[in-house]
Image: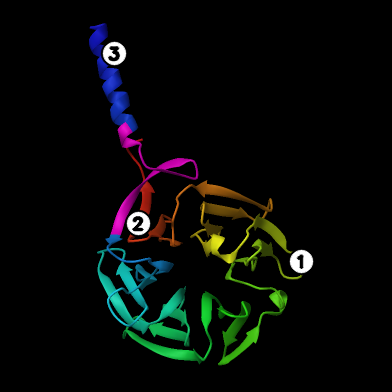
Amino acid sequence: MLKFLFFSLAAIQAASSEGCKGILYDGKPYKEQLMKADIYKPSSLAIDYKTSALYFTHIDQTGDIFYKTAKINLKDGKFTNLEVNNGFSLDVDQKNHVIYVGGYKGIYKYNERNNKAQLIVRGINTWNVFYKNVLYYIEFVSQTLFTYSNGKSKPVEELEGIKVYFFVMDDEDYMVYSNGTGVFGKKKGEQEVLYKDVKSVDEIREITLDRNGRVFVLAADGIYRVNKVTESIVKVAEIQDVYGMAFDIDNNLIFSKENSLLRLVPNKDC
């Protein structure tokens, strides 16, 4: 009888261990849920929470167009390529459900209802876009941060003279940005805080906000969360070779690998 119980417990432990294989995210077990396969280097993920649409760019390997803009309906998985080409940065105006796409020709304003895009900022090689009350964008060559409002662009005075590669601003107007030397945070009128040293701009691949307004940094060696109160940064996942990330309406992490889009969901087998 004891021998039977021993082997039963061993079998249960083995099954539990097998079920717990996956990813530790913020100290808890998660598993990957495939959302889209056979898509090359999807990046710059952005979600419209009202329509449950995940927008992103990906590299086209079949034609003359280098970058394509696409979306996936998070409810039914439907995939659609949009009529906006050669854009490689996206963000969503959540209030008006407008998508902004930055590329080497300028910035497009895309309307999901009619699947049309309008080039609103011309002749600017745009590397990164971010929307919060107004549109922020980074000009690629100079790495200068601008705002665009009422048809006019102007540099952001608070970061004038500072090179910026990625940029976000939270609900308390705290700015987090990266360049070729590090990841920094700054409140208006205060000194900047260094969160992470880097040796090149390529070490940071994206900076984004989760549904609670917390700042996450996607680096080449994993995913980090910024704590502006303690002025610290902590690695929350060891996921490697990730190209982009976003958070869905339930605050699940969505991220992209070289040929796929994936979502982290809690591993209930653990």
Q: Whole-percent x and y of residue 125?
A: 52, 84
| Cα–Cα gap, marks 2 and 1 | 38 Å
Q: Amino acid at mark 1?
A: Glu
Q: Quadrant of residue 6?
A: top left
Looking at the rendered image, the quarter that the C terminus falls into is: top left
The residue type indicated by label 2 comes to Leu
Q: Mark 1 Cα within 10 Å, few/some/many (few <14, many 20+)?
A: few
Q: In the drawing, what numbered circle is on residue 6?
A: 3
- Upstream in the sequence, badge 3 or badge 1? 3
- Lower sequence index among marks 2 and 1: 1
In the drawing, does residue 214 fall left or right of residue 267?
right
Q: Is residue 185 visible?
A: yes
223 to 61, vertically: above or below: above
Real-space Cα distance between discs 3 and 1? Answer: 63 Å
Q: Distance of mark 3 from mark 2, alpha carbons?
A: 38 Å
What residue span does the magenta drawing correspond to?
18-35
Numbered tag placed on residue 190 in the rendering: 1
Q: Position of residue 41 (x, y in %)?
A: 38, 66
Q: Position of residue 89 (x, y in %)?
A: 46, 75
Point 66% across, 73% down: residue: 163
Q: Nearer the viewer, mark 2 or mark 1?
A: 2
Q: Secondary structure at mark 2?
A: strand
Q: What residue is shown with label 2?
A: 262
| Kind of residue at disc 3 | Phe
At 67% from the left edge and 79% from the top edge, which residue is drawn? 156
